[in-house]
Amino acid sequence: MNTPMEIAAAPSLFGRVSLGYIVVASRKLDEWQRFAREGLGLHVDRIDAGLLALRIDAHERRILIADGPAEDVAAIGWQLRDEQALALALARLRARRVEVSEIGGAQAAERGVERLFAFTGPKRLRFELFTTPRVSSQPLDMLASGFVTGDLGLGHFAMTTREPEAAQHFFESMFDARLSDTIEDRLNGVTLELSFLRMNERHHTTALAATRGKRMNPLRTAIHHLNVQAASLDDVTLAYQRLRGMGCAIANAIGQHPNDRELSFYVQTPSGFEIELGWNPILVTDEAAWQPAHYRGISLWGHFPESLTLGGKLGQMGRGLASLVRQEYTVGAAA
């Protein structure tokens, strides 16, 4: 049994990992280009006929849209602070007997990194580890005034899972994620339980959602949403107006969450998952003082659904029932 001193001295990735990029496979590159540039207000580079690179800071790649039929997130890139942090992450994967592929050259450059290490994460979503992003000296050309990234990373993502305990254990044992808080809410006739995990001062980098009781997954896409944090409230409200004017499906109007206090709205992307554009969430700056809380209700106010239809509800119900007969992949247990 480890002593308190040994536990305290154990190496940790907390504060040394952040969300680096996401890769989307889509055949709707023209729609994505307009959605991202004219709607969200991001910088968009058309690399070639089959690749879009969306920038929000100096990183060459933050969101990649690559030609492909899935209309879904195809990979998530995790940035490790240094080579020592990367070595620790790889050692943990080896201990779980998880197969890892090292990728360099043109494939890595397409991701905007020098090299990466890829493996299969929860729900068979491809996870990629890297340390050194390629940065651009090209000035950002975007409608938004800016975004909050840096050591906090790209933002956060939320995913539904039929194996929430296994998924939470993976993030806690792999990245030393810490539970910020939990929420329960009743949506479309089912009770959802959500856990919010932080990996640095950002209130959460990953949120896990599961149905209470019979575990179902009503979503077609690998994640429910990707969050990016705008630099100003005007960036949020103006993007909301632009996207509504463009006829984009607003999943949830502007509102505020009770746990991280972020003011945000949700819009459906051309590929079907959502992007949450938010402003001014709290940071967890005092680890010793933070205590996880439990909230009832996902929103303090607002976030009213604007585009939910009967067909959409029925589709979610059908997918949820169909998911009951499929086993969800969980990353191998530690040896």
Image (tube, rainbow, N blue to C red):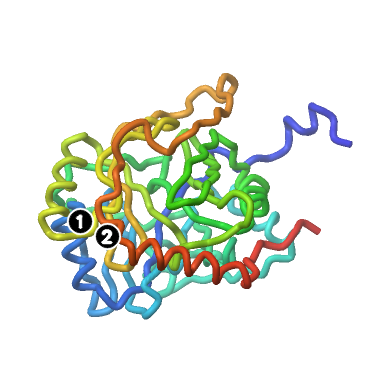
**Disc 1: which residue:** 43
Answer yes or no: is residue 109 visible.
Answer: no
The quarter of the image holding the C terminus is: bottom right
Q: Position of residue 265 (x, y in %)?
A: 28, 44
The quarter of the image holding the N terminus is: top right
Of the residues shown, which amino acid type is indicated by label 1? His
Residue 234 relative to residue 130: left or right: left
Q: Are marks 1 and 2 in contact (CB under 8 Å)?
A: yes
Label 1 residue SS:
strand
Answer yes or no: is residue 312 visible.
Answer: yes
Q: Quadrant of residue 307?
A: bottom left
Q: Residue furthest top?
A: 289
Query: Mark 1, residues whose alpha carbon is within 10 Å: few (<14), some, or many (≥20)?
Result: many
Residue under the point 59% across and 37% down:
178
Q: Position of residue 22 (x, y in %)?
A: 40, 60
Of the residues shown, which amino acid type is indicated by label 2? Leu
Residue 40 relative to residue 84: left or right: left
Label 2 residue SS:
strand
**Disc 2: which residue:** 54
Q: Residue furthest right?
A: 1
Residue 289 relative to residue 34: left or right: right
Residue 256 numbered mark, or none: none
Residue 187 relative to residue 56: left or right: right
Establish if 33 lies above or below 229. below
Q: Identify the mark nearer the N-term, 1 or 2.
A: 1
Q: Position of residue 87 (x, y in %)?
A: 63, 54
Establish if 45 lies above or below 187. below
